[in-house]
Image: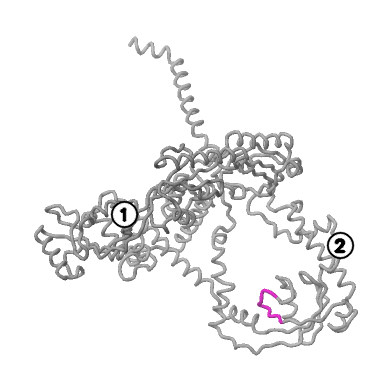
Amino acid sequence: MATLEKIRSKSAILFTVIIVALLAFILGDFFNSSRSFFGPGTTAAKVDNHKIDIQQFNTRVEQMRQRMQDQGYTAPDLAILQTQVLNDMIYESLLNQEYEDLGIVVTDKELSSAMTGATALPGLVQQIQQQFGVQSPEQLHDMAFNPSKYQIPAEMANQLQTYWIELEQNVEKELKQQKFATLFMGALTANKLDAREMFDENAATSEIAYAKVDYASLPDDEFKPTDDEIKAKYNEIKNRFRLQEPIRKIDYITVDIVPSEDDLLKAEQAVEEAMQILNTTEGVDGLSGYFVANNRTAKRNGFSSQIAAAIDTMEVGQAKLISFVNNTYTIAKLLGRNANQQDSVKLDFAVLEVASDAQRDSIIGALNSGAKISDIAQVVNQQPEQTISLLDPNATQIKQLLDGATTGRYFTPDTVAGSKQVRVIRVNGYSPSVTTYDVSEITYTVDPSSTTVNYLTQQLRDFLAENNTAAKFSEQAAQAGYHIFPAEVGPQSLSIANIPDTRGAVKWVMNAKKGQVSDVYGDDQTGRLIAVSLLDIYDNGYVPVTDNGVRDYVAAIAENDKKAAKIIADYQGKANSVAEYAKLMNTDVDTTKVTFGQRAISGFALGESDLAAAVATAQKGQLVGPMQSNSAVVVFVVNDIDKSGREFNFDTDKMRFNQQQAGSILARNLFNIMLGGNKVENNLLQFYQD
């Protein structure tokens, strides 16, 4: 009781302590997870209600990078790779929603049929045969999930199982895409009216005689549009400049970090010293760590053409300077010359499943007495004849297995008594003997010294300190020896102008104010320095007319309008034929043929839709014009209309319509069609610091 009384007497203090502890816990958790409150949480990107999780995104990026490396490709800059993966995942997300809405599924039977059996996808079969050397997808599946049958180690079996599961997922995606494409293309096909319209647009070809005055023949200075005229024309065609997202206009400077003259001179001296060491000592062990030696044994044509030419005249133990390209020296040292070397061997290979050693020996005897391996019931895996290089550095094991083997005879190279599965090999023959060369290919790359890097960095920083506004940045760059490049950056940008390792500069741009200039980004690891100035921010849905590119474009159109108005006013109604107009215009009469459905008219600029429409609606013999076209004022008369082509055929014109205007055209823009009016919310910049 006394204890309870003490607790009651201190209840106020205890209550306060508990509240403070709870607040500390809540606030601590709040600050530790502030991204969930104020940021994107774990959402890398969002489209409508579709979210892409950052962990799934990172996994896909790593898978893509690994896949490219496995296939021998150099993975692009991380930001570029992430952009590609993100676009793929957004597209997949939108597609999956379409599949769900349309009820598109792939049954187990359909998946099995596409992956195995007589109806397996041809591309899949070819891929598996090339990559694994097996005859069919069924065999690969059997190897993956029954590894003991093929004496496959557990680790390799796990890799094959993972590969097979990924393959199933990819095939399922492909089948769904095929079903969707069939529905999509089938829903967007021509009816009789569409086919007839396509026929009519291309059925008649009009031959016209015309005279024209090109806008380029008038002096530009006399027709410069005013600011009000440019604004009026801009408002007329404003939709051409609609923005999908806010953008930020920037200028940037890049400085490549390359070796200085002093760096190159020191490198030249280092190479001279290395050559002396190589030509006076055995091997290549006396070189400094800056020189990378790769020792290889190969035939003459196994080396680069420059090394191959050099080793013909080299003595064993001699080194020669081969090349200096892209700041990299290449030196070759001939370590040995080997005559009468076997280049490759042709092998047959099979796996037998036997009940006993006696049965194994009986089968080997039968094979060596003329029996065909394809007739042996105990064969569970037979490979086609393979040619194995014996010059490959990894061929040591196969050389040991074949040591003492008799050509044309089957044998078991690694048989263990009592084994139920055994490997059987037959040597079918060796290639003719060749001469091989032991060569050490030594490279030395000249890197910029820290002195050079510091100098280039400080030089750029000094420029930025003196030119700390966007206007000064752009105006003074050339005088300081820098070249200015324009670019645009938006919420979806993960790099500047696809330059690797520029995400930090992008983050600065997205948080900067108009007119600001950045610090220096980049270092000797990225290979370049970059500095950025923020010129303008366009966030009202359209690129404004104040944008230099837009203003120039609109001004050119407004200028042509003024020229057209002047030319038409000068000649309107002053002649009664094309020939008379041509005389007044001081030009010649020309002829051309016009079909309404064609994309270009010979003798005119591209995109002359107004002229094509005017010709299509004109009567034979009717004088039309002067009229404004894209690049000239034109007067024309239709001399003849040719309708002697083929008759209307629904199937032919339906196919033509589908190719030019229906599903096949719309499919190219499928992503934007599915995206609709939804905006992509890209949060990647908030997850990465560099």
Q: Which label was assigned to residue 378?
A: none
Q: Quadrant of residue 522?
A: top right
Of 620 and 148, nearer the camera is 148
Q: Viewed as shown, does residue 498 lie left or right of 609?
A: left
Q: Secondary structure at mark 1?
A: helix
Q: Viewed as shown, does residue 79 lie left or right of 379?
A: right
Q: Quadrant of residue 161?
A: bottom left
| Magenta stretch holds residue 599 | yes
Q: Quadrant of the N terminus?
A: top left
Q: Which label was assigned to residue 160?
A: 1
Q: Is residue 177 above or below residue 31?
A: below
Label 1 neighbourhood size at 10 Å, few (<14), some (14-19), many (20+)?
some
Of 204 and 601, nearer the camera is 601
Q: Position of residue 250 (x, y in %)?
A: 68, 46
Q: Position of residue 582 (x, y in %)?
A: 85, 80
Which of the colour schemes (rainbow, by chain, secondary structure, one colour) is used? Answer: one colour
| Magenta stretch holds residue 372 | no
Query: Which one is earlier in the sequence, the residue at label 2 or at label 1?
Result: 1
- CA–CA distance in space, label 2 to label 1: 72 Å
Q: Which residues are magenta?
A: 593-600
In the image, what residue occupies the spot 26% across and 58% down?
A: 143
Q: Secondary structure at mark 2?
A: helix
Residue on which the image places disc 2? 223
Q: Amino acid at mark 1?
A: Leu
